[in-house]
Image (spheres, helix red, strand yellow):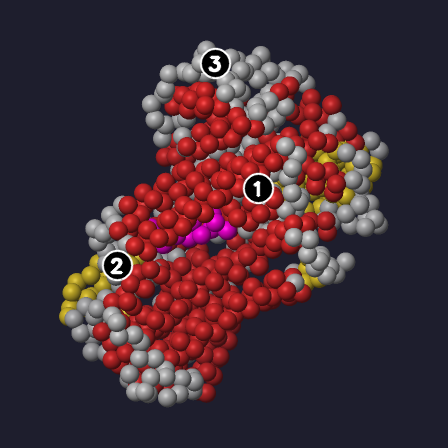
């Protein structure tokens, strides 16, 4: 097995990150909050220009890796657009994207977009989903909308795995950015006559965060590989990835905020936006304890097949 | 809680409460008499709270405008003040004079009865008062202590863009000019500056001296020309923090606190003087309302009908949090009592702050987890509440205020290491 991303996928992700930067970078989410329609007018065309919607992650390993790399780049800019959700659109159902949902109030960060959604639960029940009208501005909702579901079938187990894995790549991109922002801050910010980074207590906090981020990156690659190479394990691997990503996000954002100091909570710094827009990804469809519980149910007493079992 | 019969010693209750004489600027204010005995005092305070803590104040303060918040705070402060409960830690001649035992009981009861916190007056009654009492002139005390009781609001103007943890690196300058000082610079993280009448200001009077020796401490009237206050929008959506821009602001020399260029020492003394009881109050709030709501949230049936508390993991987390909170309350009480006895250690306050702030974050984090996705939609919290309002997401974000300002956790650890454990100092660049 090889869990390295292909050179092409890595390069595609790099180009996507540049294209999104050229389209506005950090300003994209800030402007979208002021004018939500900008997401459709400004962000969607950039993604279309990158060929995002021609990717077929369900059937081809190369395209799946490219999709993952694109999600990671979107996360890096806290892109206010459901890239991972659109890339996870299910084969065979006429829809623009897929949302993994959980009872009792299915919701997703897809407010005010004119798109047709299919929703799927972790146990594979699929529905058509329509977003309910927004009652609060994006400043409060982070574009999360409640969904109204009409059941379709119960064939969505594979969809659920893909629909869980790709948003973790978005979150990984956010963790990449949080580390970059914090590294830059502690290198530049001077107190007591030296950069914060010169204090070992500061260095160790950032290194702990980086270790967490690196672990998620490896698991994200593994879960991606598992989607096509080991479908029977894909859902458990996706949930394990989600659990690790949520735990890592807690550590990484905690450290990033602490080392930024008060300024990290003010909208002058991008960390404040990044951290806020990471929330829907970290809470929906399943928060930390709900993810842990689902993973436990999936595994029973069997445990994960994992990288180093004899079967591999 | 129903009001209890007044205990022996006549619990103050309006209008029969022992009213102090109407304060006159410059005149000391007499505090009303409360029972000395802690048990009697507790019963009396409980009784008073039963009749005076505004019913439904949390609902009324949710979504309140800045003006409504300020009006409510000032009114509550005056209610406490009228019966001598607003500044129990001040000396008797200025309107306080309660024993440490009484103060402990008072804060326990205010927390247990879920009384609004004195958010707006906080800097005035703690930082400004301790500055004036420790280092102020008689005239400064007479001018400001009664005014604070009348509702004068204060803000702290210490931090700057380049001076956070390294506060002594501050750059705002105060140049002697005639009978005053001309101040220029920028202050940051001045909480509640939009409401402030006066500011505790640190500025550099000797740019050539070593950095801790060229700073002076001033009382700045916020109505002085040349001051601009700009609120900063925070991740919670509120604008509690402010920037203060000072452009040729003239401060009369009479408003200097302590000797010129000795402001760093004054700040150290006065900051040290307010430690302890404020932490005890916060610990009691966390132990009462904060933990109670967490336990209630755990006992409430979730969307699927199951109560989180039925889960053994939740029980375990609750039990460990309660254990830690109990430890915190004991630690705070010990700090306060040793402070009063003059036996406080050099790192004790840092230990309490580190313990509280990190425990607060863990508790609020758990609250967010228990509240689930539904909790993410509760994005308004009552003004006048503390760091535990039941709006878990905002409480969690707000809890970060504690590991950063007033000495970050990193600074507290350094103090505990160096002054508490006697470890070598971290190498410094200057």
Q: Secondary structure at mark 1?
A: loop
Gap in angstroms between the C-alphas marked 3 and 1? 39 Å
Tell me if A41 is positioned left or right of A305 in this view: right
Is residue B384 visible in the rendered structure shown here?
Answer: yes
Q: Which residue is mark 2?
A: A106
Crowd tier of the residue under label 1, counting other residues whose Cα lies within 10 Å: few below 14, some 14–19, many 20 or above: many
Residue B379: give x, y in percent of width and height.
39, 47
The picture quadrant where one finds residue A188 is bottom right
- Is residue B164 shown left or right of residue B368? right
Q: Which residue is mark 3?
A: B9
Range drawn in magenta? B358-371
The circle drawn on residue B191 is 1
Q: Nearer the viewer, mark 2 or mark 3?
A: 3
Q: Secondary structure at mark 3?
A: loop
What is the crowding at mark 3: few (fewer than 14 residues within 10 Å), some, or many (at least 20)? some
- Residue B114, relative to residue A187: is it above or below? above
Residue that appears at 26% across and 51% down: B310
3D distance between C-alphas at marks 1 and 2: 38 Å
Looking at the image, which is closer to me, B179 or B28?
B28
Residue B242, quarter of picture: top right
In the rendered image, residue A185, in percent from the top left (x then y), is placed at 61, 63
Q: Residue at x 47, y 21 (%)?
A: B41
Dots 3, 1 in contact, CB < 8 A: no
Picture coordinates of residue B103 (x, y %)?
A: 53, 28
Where in the figure is residue B137, as x and y percent of width and height? 75, 26
């Amino acid at each position: 097995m090889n869990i390295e991303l292909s050179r092409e996928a890595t390069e595609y992700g790099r180009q996507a990150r540049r294209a999104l930067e050229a389209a506005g970078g950090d300003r994209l989410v800030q402007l979208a909050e002021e004018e939500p329609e900008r997401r459709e007018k400004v962000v969607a065309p950039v993604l279309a220009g990158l060929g995002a919607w021609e990717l077929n992650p369900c059937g081809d390993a190369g395209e799946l890796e490219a999709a993952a790399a694109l999600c990671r780049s979107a996360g890096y800019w806290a892109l206010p657009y459901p890239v991972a959700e659109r890339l996870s659109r299910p084969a065979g159902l006429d829809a623009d994207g897929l949302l993994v949902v959980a009872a009792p109030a299915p919701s997703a960060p897809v407010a005010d977009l004119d798109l047709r959604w299919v929703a799927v639960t972790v146990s594979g029940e699929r529905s058509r989903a329509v977003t309910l009208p927004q009652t609060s501005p994006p400043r409060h909702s982070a574009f999360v909308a409640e969904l109204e579901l009409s059941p379709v079938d119960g064939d969505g187990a594979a969809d659920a795995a893909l629909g869980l894995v790709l948003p973790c790549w978005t979150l990984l991109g956010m963790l990449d950015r949080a580390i970059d922002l914090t590294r830059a801050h502690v290198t530049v910010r001077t107190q007591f006559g030296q950069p914060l980074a010169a204090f070992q207590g500061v260095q160790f906090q950032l290194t702990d965060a980086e270790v967490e981020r690196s672990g998620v990156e490896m698991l994200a690659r593994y879960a991606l590989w598992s989607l096509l190479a080991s479908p029977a394990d894909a859902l458990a691997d996706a949930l394990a990835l989600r659990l690790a990503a949520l735990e890592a996000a807690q550590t990484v954002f905690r450290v990033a905020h602490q080392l930024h100091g008060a300024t990290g909570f003010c909208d002058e710094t991008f960390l404040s936006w990044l951290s806020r827009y990471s929330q829907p990804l970290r809470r929906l469809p399943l928060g930390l304890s709900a993810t842990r519980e689902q993973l436990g149910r999936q595994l029973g007493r069997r445990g994960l097949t994992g990288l180093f079992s004899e079967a591999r | 809680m129903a009001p209890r019969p007044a205990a022996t010693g006549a619990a103050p209750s309006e209008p029969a409460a022992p009213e102090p004489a109407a304060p006159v600027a410059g005149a000391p204010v007499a505090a009303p008499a409360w029972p000395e005995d802690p048990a009697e005092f507790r019963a009396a305070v409980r009784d008073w709270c039963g009749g005076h803590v505004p019913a439904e104040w949390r609902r009324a303060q949710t979504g309140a405008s800045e003006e409504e918040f300020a009006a409510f705070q000032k009114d509550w402060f005056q209610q406490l003040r009228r019966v001598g409960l607003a500044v129990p830690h001040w000396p008797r001649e200025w309107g306080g004079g309660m024993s440490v035992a009484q103060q402990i009981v008072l804060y326990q009861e205010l927390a247990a009865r879920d009384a609004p916190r004195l958010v707006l007056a906080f800097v005035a009654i703690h930082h400004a008062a301790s500055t004036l009492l420790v280092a102020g002139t008689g005239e400064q005390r007479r001018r400001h202590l009664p005014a604070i009781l009348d509702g004068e609001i204060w803000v702290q103007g210490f931090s700057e863009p380049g001076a956070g943890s390294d506060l002594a690196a501050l750059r705002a300058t105060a140049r002697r000019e005639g009978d005053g000082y001309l101040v220029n610079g920028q202050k940051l993280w001045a909480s509640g500056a939009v409401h402030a009448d006066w500011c505790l200001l640190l500025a550099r009077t000797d740019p050539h001296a070593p950095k801790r020796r060229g700073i002076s401490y001033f009382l700045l009237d916020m109505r002085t020309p040349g001051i601009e206050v700009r609120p900063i929008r925070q991740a919670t959506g509120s604008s509690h923090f402010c920037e203060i821009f000072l452009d040729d602001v003239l401060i009369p020399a009479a408003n200097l606190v302590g000797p010129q260029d000795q402001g760093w020492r004054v700040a150290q003394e006065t900051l040290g003087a307010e430690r302890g009881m404020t932490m005890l109050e916060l610990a009691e709030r966390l132990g009462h309302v904060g933990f109670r709501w967490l336990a209630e949230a755990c006992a409430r049936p979730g969307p699927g009908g199951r109560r989180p508390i039925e889960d053994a993991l939740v029980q375990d987390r609750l039990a460990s949090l309660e254990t830690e909170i109990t430890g915190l309350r004991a630690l705070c009480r010990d700090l306060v009592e040793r402070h009063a006895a003059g036996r406080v250690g050099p790192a004790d306050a840092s230990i309490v702050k580190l313990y509280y702030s990190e425990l607060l974050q863990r508790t609020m984090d758990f609250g967010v987890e228990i509240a689930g996705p539904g909790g993410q939609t509760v994005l308004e919290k009552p003004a006048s509440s503390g760091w535990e309002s039941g709006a878990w997401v905002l409480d969690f974000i707000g809890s970060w205020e504690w590991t950063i300002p007033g000495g970050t956790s990193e600074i507290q650890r350094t103090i505990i290491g160096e002054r508490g454990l006697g470890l070598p100092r971290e190498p410094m660049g200057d």
